[in-house]
Amino acid sequence: MSQQFTLYNDLTAMQNIRFYGSVHGLPSDELRQRISEIIQMAGLEGRENTLTGKFVWGMETTTCIGLCDRSSS
């Protein structure tokens, strides 16, 4: 199994976070909170509606770290 976490390049940062949160069964209130937290943590304020395919590697990696941060809790 690959250890690389992949974002969907044809989705925005917000859409990717929402997608993965829903896959992990986060309730909608918690998902809204996590989206805000991850956007802020990744320094993506103002870029949350940018396609992730346009991200530089560091932005994508930081977004992935934010997604994985609580995925096991």
Image (spheres, rainbow, N blue to C red):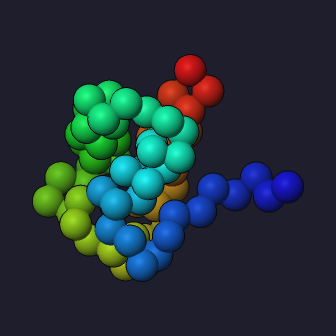
Q: Is residue 55 visible?
A: no
Q: Is residue 68 visible?
A: yes
In the rendering, at what x and y percent does residue 45 appear?
A: 18, 52
Q: Is residue 33 left or right of residue 11?
A: left
In the rendering, at what x and y percent does residue 67 appear?
A: 48, 43
Q: As rendered, which of 25 and 20 lies closer to the eye? A: 25
Residue drawn 59% across the image and 62% down it: 6
Residue drawn 22% across the image and 66% down it: 49
Q: As rendered, which of 19 and 52 lies closer to the eye? A: 19
- The C terminus - image quarter: top right
Which quarter of the picture shows residue 46? bottom left
Q: How many marks?
A: 0
Say if 44 sits above or below 29 in the image. below
In the rendering, at what x and y percent does residue 23 appear?
A: 53, 46
Q: As rendered, which of 56 and 23 lies closer to the eye? A: 23
Which quarter of the picture shows residue 68? top right
- Which residue reaches farthest left? 46
Residue drawn 37% across the image and 30% down it: 27
- The N terminus - image quarter: bottom right
Say if 1 sits above or below 51 in the image. above
Which quarter of the picture shows residue 53? bottom left
